Image (spheres, rainbow, N blue to C red):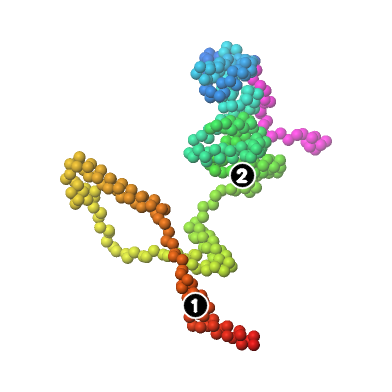
Amino acid sequence: MMAAASEEQPVINKNKRHRKEKHSFQPDDNKGGIFTEESSFATLFPKYREKYLREVWSAVTKILDPHGIACTLDLVHGSMSVRTTRKTFDPYIILKARDLIKLLARGVAITQAQKVLQDDVACDIIKIGNLVRNKDRFVKRRQRIIGPDGSTLKAIELLTQCYILVQGNTVSVMGPYKSLKEVRRIVLDCMKNIHPIYRIKELMIRRELAKDPKLATESWDRFLPKFRKQHLKTSEKTIKKNEKVAAKEEARKAAGLDASTSTKKEKPAKKVYTPFPPPQQPRKVDLQLESGEYFLKPHEREAREVQQRKQKQAEATVQRRAERAEAYVAPKEEAAPTVEEKRKRRHREVDGDDGTARSTKKKKKAEDA
């Protein structure tokens, strides 16, 4: 009987023995009563969000009112603000309200943004604007997060159970706390030129490994793929280079081309080694003293520089004109051969200089006879 009773008892995880069941924060849970000080947060929003925020602000007020949070929309300064009131009972709800207005400012719809007020949902706004300097490269890498027809973004959302919105220079993420870290890692790695597909593959493998209870206490490193870049040594690089050169030579030989002429390059002549250092180059002042420019007055020096500049411009102008005139020079035409020259050429072609063509004709006549 004792053995049967022990088999029926469920196994309790020691880490979760003393944990209480989660429940939402109620007014009765606030033992301290009314807050002594008012807390407030404000955030700016772009001009294009003004129309949408005016339309949904009544809904925002209705969502925050049960929690005792007051909100204001300032269209003059382009800002939204939230603050606690005497009816506020949850001390953490003001931070959730701050996240709500941040998400609204970044382009998230009110139906999605209101979920951040739940206890098990958090948000993270990832700034990606300063990670890549080149504008074209930034746009391409940001598009890589979304993928073709949003397929990459959808895959990340399904694997992490998060809502992701790519807008301008930021990526807004909503979801569980652990998943926010994964999404931030994927986004930052993508901006560092590591494709999201590698992280997606890793998440899929982790998801399958989590289903197996035998692997709960084991390390998963042997199952996860390693996509680190391998830095080759100098000797390994040389071997690879020689292999490529050999492959090119074989391809040229197979095509019937001369392999030696294509691969060999003229080596520069070796300089004769001397233990003495090179002679010291003259300074700018020394050169001016040598040419006499050092003793010139400032206005004389300026006049000399202007004269040299004009001389260079005149030389360049002459050279440019010569280049343009080359297009209008008529090509040399060969004179048509005279009748006498044509006759001599014909005789030369038929008889030949050594009389070989005439002898072949005689042979052909003898064979026909």
**283 and 332: which is toward the camera:** 332
- Left or right placement of residue 221 versus residue 37 in this view: right
Q: Quadrant of the C terminus?
A: bottom right
In the rendered image, the quadrant that contains the N terminus is top right
Indicate the amino acid at tag 1.
Arg
Task: Please rate how many residues cluster around mark 2, counting C-alpha atoms within 10 Å: few if below 14, some from 14 to 19, many from 20.
Answer: some
Residue 357, labelled with which disc? none
- For disc 1, the marked residue is 348
Residue at 26%, 47% (x, y): give it: 308
Q: Main secondary structure of the magenta part?
A: loop
The image shows residue 31 at horizontal and vertical percentages of 60, 15
Q: For the residue marked with disc 2, what is the amino acid?
A: Tyr
> Quarter-wise, where is residue 126 in the image?
top right
At a point 63% along the width and 46% down the height, the residue shown is 224
State the residue at coordinates (24%, 45%).
307
Q: In the structure shown, which secondary structural element does the residue marked by tag 1 occupy?
A: helix
Where is 346 relative to 292, above or below? Answer: below
Q: Does the magenta run of residues contain 10? A: yes
Q: Cα distance, mark 2 to mark 1?
A: 78 Å
Q: Residues within 10 Å of mark 1 (few under 14, many from 20)?
A: some
| Residue range (magenta) | 1-26
Above or below 202: residue 181: above
Q: Earlier in the sequence, mark 2 or mark 1?
A: 2
Camera-side mark, 2 or 1: 1
Q: Which residue is mark 2?
A: 198
Q: Is residue 273 magenta?
A: no
In the image, taking residue 26 as reference, residue 260 lies left or right, namely left
Q: Is residue 182 visible?
A: no
Report the front residue among 146 and 101: 146
Q: Secondary structure under badge 2?
A: helix
| Residue farthest to the left, as pictured | 295
